[in-house]
Image (tube, rainbow, N blue to C red):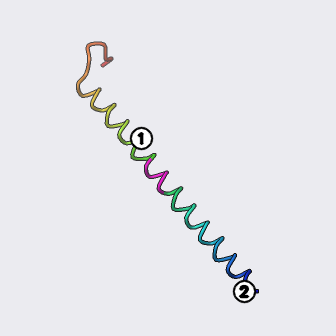
Amino acid sequence: RNRLRVRLKDAEEELRQERERRVYAESRRREGLEEVVEDMFVDVEEGSDDTIE
């Protein structure tokens, strides 16, 4: 019984770490997307002659 409890704790810890990794990866991805959007806005603000108004 005790060994099962230890294994359950290990599994819960693994799940928690996996969730943290996913959350971290998601936040990094979102930051990357925000940077891309900011770059797009900079391009629009600087404007070029071939932009459609």
Q: Earlier in the sequence, mark 1 or mark 2?
A: 2
Task: Locate residue 46, reporting x and y percent.
Answer: 23, 25
Residue 33 badge: 1
Task: Locate residue 1, reporting x and y percent.
Answer: 76, 86
Mark 1, other Cα within 10 Å: few <14 / some 14–19 / many ≥20: few
Q: Secondary structure at mark 1?
A: helix
Q: Main secondary structure of the magenta part?
A: helix
- To which quarter of the image does residue 8 belong? bottom right
In the displayed image of the protein, which residue is found farthest to the bottom?
A: 1
Residue stretch rendered in magenta on the structure: 24-28
Name the residue at 36% across, 36% down: 37
Seen from the viewer's position, the closer of residues 52 and 17 is 17
Mark 2, other Cα within 10 Å: few <14 / some 14–19 / many ≥20: few
Of circles 1 and 2, the one toward us is 2
Name the residue type under label 1: Leu
Name the residue at 52% across, 57% down: 21
Q: From the viewer's perspective, is residue 23 above or below residue 4? A: above
Task: Locate residue 40, reporting x and y percent.
Answer: 34, 31
* Distance between mark 1 and mark 2 Cα atoms: 47 Å
Task: Locate residue 20, reporting x and y percent.
Answer: 51, 62
Q: Which residue is mark 2?
A: 2
10 inside magenta stretch: no
Name the residue type under label 2: Asn
Q: Quadrant of the C terminus?
A: top left
